[in-house]
Amino acid sequence: MNILVCIKQVPGTSKVEVDPVTGVLKRDGIDSKMNPYDLYALETALRIRESNGGTVKVLSMGPNQAISVIKEAYTMGADEGTLLSDRRFGGADVLATSYTISQGVKNMGDFQLIICGKQTTDGDTAQVGPEMAEYLNIPHVANVEEIIEVKDNSIIVEMDMPESLEIVEISYPCLITVDKGIFEPRLPSYKKKVSTKDREVTIMNLDNFKDKNEKKYGLNGSPTQVERIFPPEVNNDREIWTGTSSELSEKIGTKLKSLKFI
């Protein structure tokens, strides 16, 4: 079985600068890590490969520094990795991002199963996976919390609905997004780090795609624009009160009223 896992490099810190012109995060040079939800997706793929055979490839989109998360995936057991990196991809919203990744998938070949993390910690939209599936014209299931059975032509999964659990059988090729807790992600292997240190990462840009229309990528291809984005303000103000329980209760009530909480 050929399995593709989509992974993303996200900021590893809340101290991220924002481009005042484009309103997007400045990702170059900041502390970064693999999106936590993608670790569960990768673990799911590796376990399916261990029980059913095949290959696990990873795909990411971002600046050249995102190669590090692909290398990390190698240390966990991924076989091959591809990075979509092009200035023309920058500033993409979820729709343009989904289209870009779908074009990268088409360039990589045929996959029976594509696995994504439920969402990313820097966007939290949970939209990219399903939108990718729509662009690829394949069925998809979101919020998967258990793999029940992997068959030759389909996979049976349990999905977490708002008020119920639903068991679905979905035919290949298909895409699923997995929630945290589906499996415990394994730790990177030092032996694999040594053995894969020279393994190449394939780099693709817009010129590699069949559809080279720049209006479909990056800011140009984004129907939604961020009007304003800013880091959260840090407030360390505090007050220390002393007194009897009745005095403290009165002070708390007065404070809550002044803040218009009550």
Image (tube, helix red, strand yellow):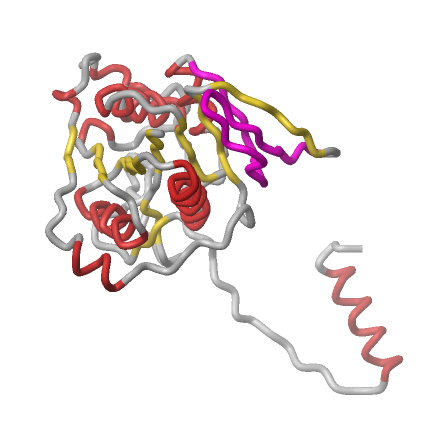
Name the foreground residue: 58 vs 95: 58
- Number of numbered discs present? 0
Confirm whether residue 230 shows in the render. Answer: no
Tell me if residue 171 comes above or below residue 185 in the rendering: above
Type of secondary structure dominating the magenta stretch: strand
Residues shaded magenta: 138-162
**Residue 227 placement (x, y as % from top left):** 41, 32
- Is residue 36 left or right of 160 when viewed as pictured? left
Name the outermost residue toward the right.
Answer: 246
Which quadrant, please, contains the C terminus?
A: bottom right
Name the foreground residue: 192 vs 262: 192
**Residue 151 placement (x, y as % from top left):** 50, 27
Q: Quadrant of residue 51?
A: top left
Which quadrant, please, contains the N terminus?
A: top left
Q: Quadrant of residue 221?
A: top left
Q: Residue at x 54, y 42 (%)?
A: 179
Residue 159 is covered by the magenta coloring: yes
Tell me if residue 43 comes above or below residue 236 in the rendering: above
Residue 204 is covered by the magenta coloring: no
Tell me if residue 187 comes above or below residue 211 in the rendering: below
Name the outermost residue toward the bottom.
Answer: 243
- Is residue 186 left or right of 238 when viewed as pictured? left
Tell me if residue 91 comes above or below residue 73 in the rendering: above
**Residue 56 placement (x, y as % from top left):** 31, 38
Name the foreground residue: 228 vs 189: 189
Confirm whether residue 26 shows in the render. Answer: yes
Name the foreground residue: 36 vs 233: 36
Q: Residue at x 84, y 74 (%)?
A: 249
**Residue 58 placement (x, y as % from top left):** 29, 38
